[in-house]
Amino acid sequence: MSQKNSSEPVLKYLAIGGQLGFAGYLVFDNITSIKAIGIHKLPSAERLDILADKFWAAGLIFSIMACLYILVHTQPKKRAKPAERERYSDENKCAKYVRSLYILHAVQSANRSTCRERSDAWIQLISDLCDLTVPGKSLGCTAFNDGLVGLAGTMSSLIGAWSQWKKTA
């Protein structure tokens, strides 16, 4: 998420919850990989797989909640109307005009930042919703068939590749 909003307590707690969810997923997924590789047979591997998927889903849900919070609480500011263009005879009117132009520039700059932040939140939200289909299917959501999970995974991967391309290009 954006660095600007990281000072908000709600987003801090959502980020902590998401990171704990992803950490739990990685821990339990790595434990079950011992069985998958064939190093050691774990009698509780299926339970650990389910637990890993629950942690993954929890991390994604926290990330989705953070995206929704950003989208709800960051609305572009209304543009200030530019001052009328007229000849200024005294310094007071000129200073007022310059100040209104400065305010207009600040609002436009804030709008660009807010729009970029909202765009990033939308992209992350779509990616997280696509990713949520994988642990959702593993945890028994019958609405997710293999084709839907595959399409969602492809979409999420393309979003990730596009995001990386955007950073380097």
Image (cartoon, helix red, strand yellow):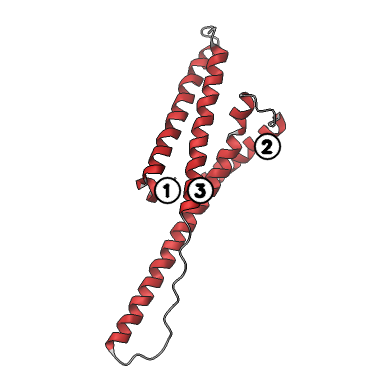
Residue at 30%, 81% (x, y): give it: 95
Marks 3 and 1 in Cβ contact (< 8 Å): yes
Give, as a three-letter code, the residue at label 3: Ala
Dot label at residue 55: none
Q: Which residue is mark 1?
A: 2
Q: Quadrant of residue 83?
A: bottom left
Is residue 135 toward the left or the right of residue 76 in the image?
Answer: right
State the image coordinates of residue 11 (x, y, percent, origin top left): 41, 43
The span from disc 3 to disc 2 (Cα, nearest Å) is 21 Å
- In the structure shown, which secondary structural element does the residue marked by tag 1 occupy? loop
State the image coordinates of residue 97 (x, y, percent, origin top left): 35, 81
The span from disc 3 to disc 1 (Cα, nearest Å) is 9 Å
Q: Which residue is mark 3?
A: 121
Q: Is residue 51 above or below residue 167?
A: above
Marks 2 and 1 in Cβ contact (< 8 Å): no
Marks 3 and 2 in Cβ contact (< 8 Å): no
The residue closer to the viewer here, 58 or 130, is 58
User: In terms of sequence position, does the residue under pointer 3 or pointer 2 come before the other?
Assistant: 3
Give, as a three-letter code, the residue at label 2: Leu
Residue at 29%, 90% (x, y): give it: 90
Q: Is residue 111 above or below residue 46?
A: below
